[in-house]
Image (cartoon, helix red, strand yellow):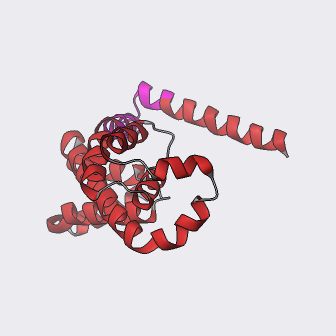
Amino acid sequence: MDELLLNFFEDYKRYAIFISIFINIVVAIFGIIPSFFITAANLIFFGFWYGTLLSFVGEALGAIIAFYLYRKGFKRFTVPIVEKYPITQKLLCVQGRNAFYLILSLRLLPFIPSGIVTLLSAMGKVSLLVFAIASTIGKIPALLIEAYSVYQVTQWTWTGKLILILFGLYLLYLFLKKVKQS
């Protein structure tokens, strides 16, 4: 996927920045597609810092646009489903400063998918402004970690190799856990 995106950037150099941001927005709207392939293409094509900044802008805008679309489109369909679970009802009622800290905290946790944080926030009572600020601030450390990891892997450094080994071991662990449960 990185190669396809890199070729696309190369073919449309004048628009590569806008293409990158647009793809990040689309990925955020779908909510389940990982964004690391866009980050990798941005790092390779634009360089580490500019590529990281571009990924950050795309992901932040994507989260805000996804929040708005989720709130307008999905809320009426998903609220009745989520209301069946008491713990999510508490999350949906959080507002103001508490909502800010909750969203910020969830963005900082790398194992919680970004789309879930956006969807739950959109279904709740948090304002767009509070979500936008908390989400954007929370994406900074997560994206820096992602950019560093992706950069190390794409440069094939010893750190990158270690990251791939640990990721492979994690996948093996998940596989064995699933086989054991079956």
Q: Position of residue 15 (x, y in %)?
A: 18, 67
Q: Nearer the viewer, residue 136 or 155?
A: 136
Q: Is residue 161 left or right of residue 56?
A: right
Q: Position of residue 120 (x, y in %)?
A: 46, 55
Residue drawn where x is 30% and y is 59% of the image: 64
Q: Is residue 74 left or right of residue 129?
A: right
Q: Quadrant of residue 66?
A: bottom left
Quick check: 144 above or below 81?
above
Q: Quadrant of the N terminus?
A: bottom left
- Residue 149: say if magenta: yes
Quick check: 8 above or below 96?
below
Residue 23 showing in the rendered view = no
Residue drawn where x is 33% and y is 52% of the image: 41
Q: Position of residue 69 (x, y in %)?
A: 36, 70
- Residue 24: say if magenta: no
Q: Nearer the viewer, residue 87 or 19?
A: 87
Residue 68 showing in the rendered view = yes
Give, as a single range, the part of the protein colored magenta.
Answer: 142-162
Q: Nearer the viewer, residue 67 or 130?
A: 130
* Extreme residue in the left direction: 14
Residue drawn where x is 28% and y is 39% of the image: 140
Quick check: 82 above or below 96?
below
Q: How many marks?
A: 0
Residue drawn where x is 31% and y is 36% of the image: 144
State the predominant SS element of the stretch in magenta: helix
